[in-house]
Image (tube, rainbow, N blue to C red):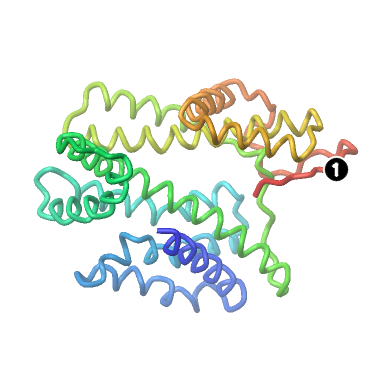
Amino acid sequence: MLFHLLASVALVAATILGARRYGTRKVAFAACLPLLVSFMAPFQWILLSGLAPAPLIGLLAAVQVERGRRYGEMLAAASLPGGLLALFLLVGLSDDSWERGDFVAGVAASLEEVVANAQLSDSEQLESLIELTLRLLPGMAYVSMLFVAVLGYQVAQRIGERIGLSLPAAPPMRRWRLWESFIWALIAALAGLLVGAGMVRDLAVNVALVLGLLFAVQGLALIRHLLWRLGVQRFLVVLVYALLAFTSGLSLMFLALLGLGDTWFDWRRIGHRQDEPPPDDGRPDQEIDT
């Protein structure tokens, strides 16, 4: 899994840099080729591993940069392959899908080590764990592809600075903010959980999962903003992050609520201006976040 993640990030960064040097049209076919090949039965593992969408993610990001789009708009476009992968998994994991058996076998094999460490002797517990993993797999796949897009762009930007291929700087984490329309998407997902059934309910579960994690990231950005405003030393910032990671179960819910509140009330007073440079208040902007 770690190898697939690192390889996907490298493919995104390489595609962005290649598009900046040679143009998006010249790298378009090469970027789309892995995805086309992955639809062939023997190579579907390339799609499920995230390797096939990675070059397309980089291509879409490069197109948005070429058009002068903002960072948020660039990420939204770059996340489209992840959304398509999530829909593919959602349909493939439906109860009446002929592919569900293959997914179950693959997930069961990947969970063998986890099950052994957790000492789940009850077969019903194992089946519940497999079912939960399958149900949340589309949302987790989308989030992982979005993470690959963010990290790949950061890598491309750092490498581009050294080889003379400039890319617009990403805004510091303390200025990250979701669009307000995401609130209505969350409300729709919660409504789907209450009244939906079958695939509609599965879609609502995964949308709620994705939005919950995104709001948690915004909550983390709010905390980063507060620490920056207070001038907290870097090692204390790392300590706060470590504490949040140690209490990940509670902190995720807390951060998601913070992010949701910030979207409603805009506590940082940045609105949709998160891509604009921050005002110069005479203090150095020491960021450890990427």
Q: In the image, 233: left or right of 116?
A: right
Q: Residue at x 43, y 72 (%)?
A: 31
Q: In the image, 49: left or right of 105?
A: right
Q: Nearest the camera: 186 or 23? A: 186
Crowding at dot 1, Cα within 10 Å, few <14 / some 14-19 / many 20+, comes out as: few
Q: Residue at x 29, y 73 (%)?
A: 37
Q: How many labels does the image show?
A: 1
Residue 65: image location, x then y, percent: 60, 60
The residue that disc 1 covers is 284
The answer to whether residue 178 of the structure is visible from this angle is no
Q: Nearest the camera: 265 or 89? A: 89
Q: Residue at x 26, y 53 (%)?
A: 88
Q: Nearest the camera: 245 or 184? A: 245
Residue 195: image location, x then y, percent: 22, 22
The answer to whether residue 68 of the structure is visible from this angle is yes
Where on the picture, by quarter, is residue 199?
Answer: top left
Residue 42: image location, x then y, percent: 21, 72
Quarter of the rendering occupied by the N terminus: bottom left
Residue type marked 1: Pro
Residue 211: image location, x then y, percent: 43, 35
**Secondary structure found at label 1:** loop
